[in-house]
Amino acid sequence: MTVETSIRLSPLADWAAAFDQLPAGIRIREMPFLTQLSLRLDPGGRAAASVAEAIGVALPTAPSTFVGTDEVEALWLGPDEWLLVAPPGAGAQLQDALRAAIGDGFGTVTDVSAQRTTLCVSGSLAQEVLARGCAIDLHPQVSPLGTCVQTRLAQAGVILLVRDDTATCVRLLVRSSFAPYVASWLVDACTEYREAVL
């Protein structure tokens, strides 16, 4: 008798060794299987206040920003669109809470967790390496902590989050089908720094 089991593999499961070989000054790691929920609603409606209460933080209304708690982050993607990011496995419970908060009002919640994976890029060389393929100015005066932009990195669409005051800790949410390409580009962009002493 043969028993088949499904093994869930992240899009970059084979890249950990390559990331471990990067030069000093830059670290890359995948954060797989994060819960990602697309939320659409009227930011001025009753549902927005109820959602804020349910997730513990008001949805950001300033363009290109994100806010969050230890449990969930809300990324502004458009005037009536957010991406909610939470730890792996939180999807069903968070969806239920959001749907209850929206109630009969206007709003939709869609689980898009399988659509993207997340890369954490950090270190003193992070800005310099990302600048080789991204037009966003990551200087802290331009892109402070809490910046969230939809942009391109080496022609691949990504959502870029600035996670600290010095812009040396950045998260990239990238579509799963493009993740190996982005990983390959990042590793290649680090090649010239292998001899750097930091």
Image (spheres, rainbow, N blue to C red):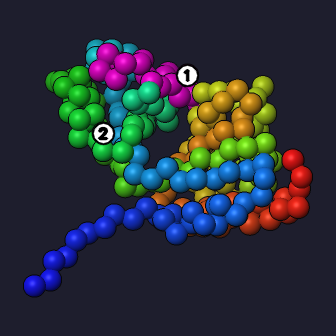
Which residues are the magenta region? Answer: 52-69
User: With respect to residue 187, does 134 lie above or below?
Assistant: above
Residue carrying label 2 = 90
Q: Residue at x 60, y 27 (%)?
A: 146
Image quadrant in which the N terminus is located: bottom left
Q: Is residue 97 left or right of residue 116?
A: left
Q: Position of residue 145 (x, y in %)?
A: 65, 27
Label 1, label 2: how far apart the Cα atoms are? 26 Å
**Would you say residue 4 sits in the magenta stretch?**
no
Q: Position of residue 149 (x, y in %)?
A: 60, 38
Residue carrying label 1 = 62
SS class, disc 2: loop
**Is residue 93 in view from this perspective?**
yes
* Amino acid on which disc 2 is placed: Ala
**Would you say residue 55 sits in the magenta stretch?**
yes
SS class, disc 1: loop
Q: Nearer the viewer, residue 89 or 195?
A: 195
The numbered dot on residue 4 is none
Dominant secondary-structure state across the stretch colored magenta:
loop
Q: Residue at x 74, y 55 (%)?
A: 133
Q: Is residue 64 left or right of residue 46?
A: right
Q: Is residue 167 left or right of residue 43?
A: right
Sort mark 2 into few (<14), some (14-19) or many (20+) by Cα contacts within 10 Å: some
Q: Nearer the viewer, residue 61 or 196?
A: 196
Q: Is residue 121 left or right of residue 114?
A: right
**Is residue 149 in view from this perspective?**
no
